[in-house]
């Protein structure tokens, strides 16, 4: 899957240059799987073992699920890298993972190959774990590897659900894209399928709860997760469509209002922040761009110090990561601002400041275009 849902995650490793991140929800699933396996599954399948073996086996199984999902997502990434599509990160969630690509597949064929790579990897792991299960004698290890084989089989089948952004939804998008030659129509259609399937999960989950089935809550959680991801993908497709062909230079603010580093905080607040209503301003000294000052930095200064504190003491120095060319795509600028958690970027031309592009500026452009 490839969605924008990456907040609340922690980087734990880098594999083949791809940062691997874990969402906080994995702590929940790790605890639930360890508890359920050690309390129910292993005591039932291997009743003669001490309790500590059940808990150890449950923790190992949860970790192996983590590895299985990571390999599933890495398989997507390997295919993407083969076609020179950079992968900015992989984030593991409670119900799977997200391979965050810097761009979209160039053709429906590439999309299809990337989509099926994950389920194929899961099916391969299911066969591998089942083969290990058949070849060993240990009671607890047999139970462990049988569980891992079944889990990877479910993971592969689950990801083939024909709704975006699941892998099956990507297959649907590849098919619609090849038929219509319209990437954005195919994305919206596949995401719409994903939302409808997610609602079915939620409805069936509610029905299961009322009829006393224990799986109802899980179905509702899965449905909620799928609906959120499909909705985000639908919105992202609309955003990409509106910004298609739009350059940073087309949206940026050209007549930039700037602050002097010698100015006091009090002067900046009264003469600029209150007057113009902007959330931040560039700091410029003799035509040389130094950095940005936002309300966040101002609020960190006690009110009584505003008349003596200089802008030069509190502004955020310029970082190349917050710089973009005017000829770059506006969508790229938005992605940079989101990834860096910034509200604005400086637009440069030959090292000189040409203007500023902001999230608010892009949002206003979207409103004007009726999206």
Image (cartoon, grey):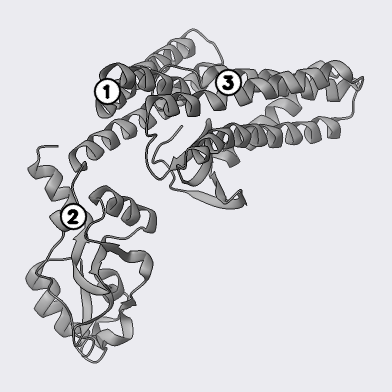
The picture places residue 144, in percent across and down from the top left corner, at 78, 25
- In the picture, the disc for residue 368 is none
Cα distance, mark 3 to mark 1? Answer: 28 Å
The picture places residue 79, in percent across and down from the top left corner, at 53, 34
Cα distance, mark 1 to mark 2? Answer: 32 Å
Which of the two marks, 1 or 2, is nearer to us in this view? Answer: 1
**Contact, mark 1 vs mark 2 (Cβ under 8 Å):** no
Q: How many marks?
A: 3
Which of the two marks, 3 or 2, is nearer to us in this view? Answer: 3
Which of the two marks, 3 or 1, is nearer to us in this view? Answer: 1
The structure residue drawn at horizontal position 38% and vertical position 16%, both measured from the top left corner, is 197
Tell me if residue 321 can be seen. yes
Q: Is 253 on the left or on the right of 149, as rendered?
A: left
The picture places residue 351, in percent across and down from the top left corner, at 27, 74
Q: Is residue 188 above or below residue 179?
A: below
Query: What is the secondary structure assignment of the residue under circle 3?
Result: helix
Q: Name the residue carrying label 2.
A: 360
Q: Earlier in the sequence, mark 1 or mark 2?
A: 1
The structure residue drawn at horizontal position 48% and vertical position 11%, both measured from the top left corner, is 208
Q: Earlier in the sequence, mark 3 or mark 1?
A: 3
Q: Nearer the viewer, residue 322 or 58?
A: 322
What quarter of the picture does the C terminus occupy? top left
The structure residue drawn at horizontal position 29% and vertical position 23%, both measured from the top left corner, is 186
Q: Name the residue carrying label 1.
A: 181
The crowding category of the residue bearing disc 3, from other C-alpha atoms within 10 Å (few below 14, some 14 to 19, many at least 20), is many
Q: Name the residue carrying label 3.
A: 156
Q: Is 112 on the left or on the right of 313, as rendered?
A: right
The structure residue drawn at horizontal position 32% and vertical position 75%, both measured from the top left corner, is 300
Q: Is residue 198 above or below residue 64?
A: above
């Amino acid at each position: 899957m490839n969605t924008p849902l990456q907040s609340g995650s922690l980087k734990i490793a880098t594999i083949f240059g791809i940062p691997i991140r874990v969402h906080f929800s994995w702590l929940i699933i790790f605890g639930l799987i360890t508890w359920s396996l050690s309390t129910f599954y292993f005591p039932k399948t291997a009743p003669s073992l001490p309790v500590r073996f059940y808990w150890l086996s449950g923790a190992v199984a949860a970790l192996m699920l983590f590895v299985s999902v990571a390999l599933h997502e890495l398989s997507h990434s390997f295919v993407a890298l083969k076609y020179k599509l950079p992968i900015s990160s992989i984030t593991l969630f409670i119900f799977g993972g997200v391979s965050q690509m810097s761009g979209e597949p160039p053709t429906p064929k590439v999309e299809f190959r990337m989509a099926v790579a994950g389920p194929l990897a899961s099916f391969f792991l299911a066969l591998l774990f089942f083969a290990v299960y058949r070849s060993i004698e240990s009671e607890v290890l047999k139970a462990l590897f049988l569980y891992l084989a079944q889990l990877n089989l479910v993971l592969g089948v689950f990801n083939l659900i024909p709704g975006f952004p699941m892998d099956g939804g990507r297959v649907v998008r590849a098919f619609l894209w090849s038929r219509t030659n319209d990437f954005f129509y195919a994305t919206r259609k596949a995401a719409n399928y994903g939302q409808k399937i997610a609602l079915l999960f939620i409805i069936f989950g509610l029905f299961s709860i009322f009829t006393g089935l224990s799986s109802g809550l899980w179905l509702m959680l899965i449905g909620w997760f799928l609906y959120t991801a499909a909705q985000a993908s639908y919105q992202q497709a609309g955003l990409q469509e509106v910004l298609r062909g739009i350059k940073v230079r087309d949206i940026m603010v050209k007549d930039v209002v700037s602050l002097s580093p010698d100015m006091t905080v009090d002067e900046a607040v009264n003469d600029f922040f209150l007057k113009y209503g902007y959330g931040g301003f560039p700091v410029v000294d003799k035509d040389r761009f130094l950095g940005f000052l936002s309300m966040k930095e101002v609020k960190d200064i006690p009110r009584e110090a505003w008349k003596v504190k200089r802008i030069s003491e509190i502004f955020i120095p310029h970082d190349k990561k917050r710089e973009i060319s005017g000829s770059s795509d506006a969508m790229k600028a938005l992605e940079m601002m989101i990834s860096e958690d910034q509200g604005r970027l400086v637009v440069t031309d030959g090292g000189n400041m040409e203007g500023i592009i902001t999230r608010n500026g892009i949002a206003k452009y979207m409103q004007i275009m009726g999206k």
